[in-house]
Amino acid sequence: MIERKISRFGVFFLIFMLPLCVFAQKGEKIQTIVIDAGHGGKDTGALGKVTNEKTLNLAVALKFGAYIEENLPDVKVIYTRKTDKFVELSERAAIANRNNADVFVSIHCNSTGTPNSAYGAETFVMGESKNEKNLEVAKKENAAILLEDNTDAYDNFDPNSTEAYILFSLSQSLYQSQSLDLAGKVQKQFASKGRHNRGVQQAGFLVLWKTSMPSILVELGFINHAKEEQFLNSEKGQTQLALALYRAFEEYKREFEAENSTTSKPVINEKKEKTEKNTVSDIYFTVQFASRDKKVSSPDKTFSGVKEVDVYEYNGAFRYVSGKFTSKDAAMKRQSEVRALGYKDAFVIAFINGERGTIKQAEEALKK
Ligand SMILES: [Zn+2]
C-alpha cells in the first residue's frame, strides 16, 4: 500500500515537479502575495473557550493584507477567503498557482491535547516532520480534507495515517530556502515583540504541498491556552501579529529585490561621460522611512525629530526620505537614527541621476 503510494508520487514528481525546477527562479520583483486564512465555513478549525480558529485566522489575515495594500502599493494582495466560507485545501494552493503568486502565507492557530500547556508562535515550511509534535500539527491541519466532498486532488491521502506522510519527504526542495528565509523573518518579528518563539519547523501540509512559490504556514499561537486565546482574540494582539507578518514580508521583499536587481536594466544614463566625476547630485543614498497617499502639509511637524526630510513620488504614493549621503555607511548610520525614532521599517535606497535605484546599482555607478 505504501509502495504503491510512493511510486505514484514518484511519477507525479517526475512529470510535474522536475520541470518546475527549471523555472524555480521567479521574477525580479515580489508583486503578488496570496494570504490564506486557514479553515472557514463548516470547518471551524481548533476551538478555544470564547472563539474559534477560523475567526482569528481571518481577522489577522485581513489586517495583514491591509497593511500591505496601504504601504506596498506595488504588491497585489489576493485572499483565499475574505469571509467565513469553506475553501478546499487544494483550491487554496490552486488560487496561488493560478495567480502566479510570488509568496503564499497560510495563517492558523495551534492547539494541543492538554489545554493551557503549550503556548507561543511557530512557522512551518513544507518538509518532512522531524518529530512527533510537528507531525501532529500537520495531521490536525490536514484533517480539513475530511470535510471536503471530493478528495481526488490528494491521491487517496489519509491525513491520520503516519505512513502517508512519507510522501512529503520527497517534495521539499524547490522553494525551500526562500520559504525558510521568510519563515525565519516571521519568527524574528514575533520574538521581537516578546512572543514565545517556538522556531521555524517543517512538516507535510497539504495546503503547501502543491504551491509553486515560497510558502509558509504560520501558527500564531495556541487557542486552547486561556491567556494566549485572550491575546489572539484582542484587537491589540491581532494588530501586533499582523504587523509582525507585514514587517517580515516587507523585509523579505526588499532583500529579494535588492539581490535580484543586478540583472535588471541599469538606471544609469549610458550617455554620461565616464571620465566625468560623479557628484552627490548624480548619485546619492538616502533613508526612506514613510509612505503616504497624500502629501503631508508640514513634514517637519508630522515627522518631528527626523533630520533633512525630503519627499519624492513613486508608484502613486509620496515617499518620505531623510538625508543625502555620498556613502552607504553614512546612510546606514542615518537609518539607525531614524529607526530609533520609531520608524522601524526605514531602509536605505539610492538615487542615480534622478531615478530611484538600489544600493548595489549606486555602488556600481560610483565606481565608474
Ligand atoms: Zn488550522
Image (spheres, helix red, strand yellow):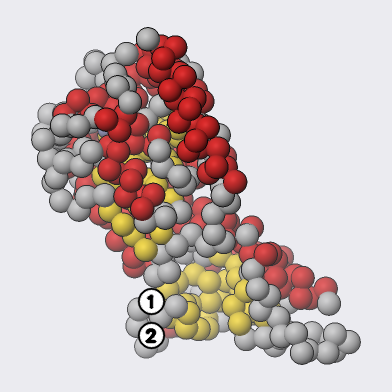
In the image shown, does 12 or 197 lie closer to the viewer?
A: 12
Q: Which residue is mark 1?
A: 292
Tell me which residue sits at (52%, 32%) in the image: 14
**Ligand number 1: quarter of image:** top left
Left-right relation of 339 to 132: right
Q: Which of the image's four quarters has the N terminus?
A: top left
Query: Can residue 364 be seen from the camera position used here?
Result: yes
Q: Position of residue 151 (x, y in %)?
A: 24, 29
Q: CA distance from mark 2 to mark 1?
A: 7 Å
Left-right relation of 293 to 201: left
Among all residues in the image, which is located at the extreme top?
1
Label 2 close to label 1 by CB (< 8 Å):
yes
Numbered badge on residue 66: none
Q: Position of residue 62 (x, y in %)?
A: 25, 54
Tell me which residue sits at (27%, 43%) in the image: 91
Tell me which residue sits at (71%, 85%) in the image: 269
Q: Which of the image's four quarters has the C terminus?
A: bottom right
Q: Which residue is mark 2?
A: 295
What's the amino acid at mark 2?
A: Lys
Q: Is residue 157 above or below residue 80?
A: above
